Image: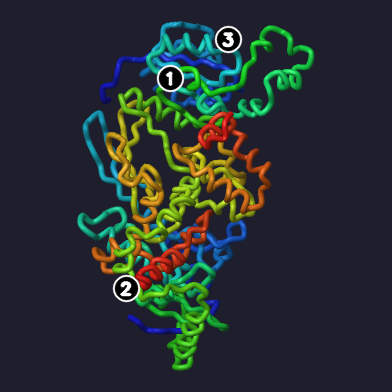
Amino acid sequence: MGTMEIITRKDFRRLVEGLLGDYTLYGPVEKEGFPAFARIERFSQLRLSRTPTHLSAKEFLFPPRETLLRFDLKNGDVREVVDAQNQAIIGLHPCDIHAVNLLDRVFSYGTPDRNYLARRKRTVIIGTECTPDEYCFCSSLHTMTVDRGFDLFLHETERGFIVRTGTKRGRRLLERYTSATKAEKADLERLERMVERKEKMFRTRLDAEPSQLPLIYRGADSSPVWDRIGRVCYGCGSCNHVCPTCYCFDVKDDITLDLEDATRYRVWDGCTLEDFAKVAGGHNFRKARSARLRHRFNRKFRYLADRFKGLFCVGCGRCSRTCLVRINISEVTNEIIRETKER
Amino acid sequence: MIPTVKKPRLAFFSFTCCEGCQLMVLNCEDEFPDLVKLVDIVNFREAMSEKSDDYDVAFVEGSISRREEIKKLKEIRKRASTVIALGACSSTGGLNCLRNRFPVEEAKRIVYGKDAAVRKIKDTIRARPIDSIIEVDHYIHGCPITKEEFLSTLKALLLGKAPEVPNHPVCVDCKMAGNICVFERGATCMGPVTRAGCNAICITYGSICWGCRGTVDNPNMDAHEETLRRYGLTADSVTRSLDLYGGCTVRKKTGRGD
């Protein structure tokens, strides 16, 4: 692994068309003028996007709604439902692949999540290179480049792509569908220059190192920032749902009208929604929007960092982009960093 | 089959509305064979001619806009053990509340001209949701309601559970549907403050959210007005957006008075 090769544009097309034959393929398309992940059925639909999609690609590994169990109430039987198929996702950026690596840890932790893990095992991941937009700040979180979590990673150049291979499965795909040639020293240098150029393009940066953020957040529980952003927040859950690492879900039951069969399913949930921390009897542990936002930010930069050895923000900027009241994750974090330094 | 409460008697009633929500119930054609094994439908003008005053669950459609309707509604409340508001007109007042922007006499004159003097029209009052008159046990929102929500409410009642009414905004349904945000498309939308449960159907099919399901329990209306203004709406169009389905309820919630 870790080898580097060159493929032409023709090779790339053959690779995508090969994937179309063997896998259910997802990748970026143009939707109403914006890049968005969708099912790809023809090569021509694929529009590799340099900038992030509004929604992440987590829906292909962790669907918004997923059946977990089926009950036969006549006989009292219960059956597990694991719905996984061979699928490939193309066009994930480095931050997105970091996010998948985090989800892998989450869904393997404690009782392994069979639904997620079965689907993940059968998912080919092909990364592509990106250009930061005004909300991206992955360079500040060391997620601007990625070296594992993908089968293949494609760096587009003037003539074709420099390909990094991450797995045996990736190698097989490359050998089967392309006539890849070994990368030369000049190609490797070009790749290094591309990374350097990208690093310089960021307009959004954090004013602290990622390793300092859990401690900085620990000291920020009574920061005035929470009330300020809590006042304007809708509590609409959009930041949760566009986030590539938010993985919370609710579990519900549904019954057929003849009252003989039932299903248990999960649906996406979000900690900024009003009912998220509501419990039996109607008590709500985080009734105020400010408390819910503080919780979400702490989940990204502090609480989960201990358990999973990594921040749960990958710097994709999607939450800032989607927020109609302009709550911006990097601005909030920088404000907290500033308060900490002033203390 | 799991045991349920005794076969309840269902009745449907209609006040000021288009009766489109009853039509959605009628659209449950595939489910009726199973449904009638579990319930007796004893009053449903849009579907049958028989009528009975002996019922357990009353589905009430439409808003209240005449004094005579108040009397009828109170009578229904007395007879039914459970009253369910069926659709926007009934649960929030719905579109009918648009009329309340005018004094009643002026509205009558604009709409009916010289006929405004006939008894039935003379009886007209400001439009209002049914829970401003009687206690309501459950709500099925929407203009019109969805078939799925009608059925899930009914199933919950049969199982002795509280029906689930989503308390998150349409933004959640939109993200789950994979939609491009209406605001990104360059339009504006009531989705961020509107109660979901519709699968964001209007946005998915290229329109915007008009707010037909009413607001979530605690909408941030100040934030929404600010957002609408920031996306180019004038003060007047902001009010119009909020009033379309929120004439009777949003004003009350935000203390704008009615």
Q: Amino acid at mark 2?
A: Gln
Asked which secondary structure carries label 3, the reply is helix
In the figure, is residue B82 to the left or right of A155?
left
Vertical side of A16 occupied by B82: above or below:
above
Q: Amino acid at mark 3?
A: Glu
Q: Nearer the viewer, residue A47 or A339?
A: A339
Q: Position of residue A121 (x, y in %)?
A: 31, 62
Residue at the spot of label 2 = A212
Closer to viewer: mark 3 or mark 2: 2
Q: Position of residue A246 (x, y in %)?
A: 37, 57
Q: Position of residue B152 (x, y in %)?
A: 40, 30
Residue depicted at x 56% and y 26%: B93
Cα separation, mark 2 vs mark 1, equals: 55 Å
Which chain letter matches label 1?
B
Residue at the spot of label 3 = B68
User: Number of labelled discs?
Assistant: 3
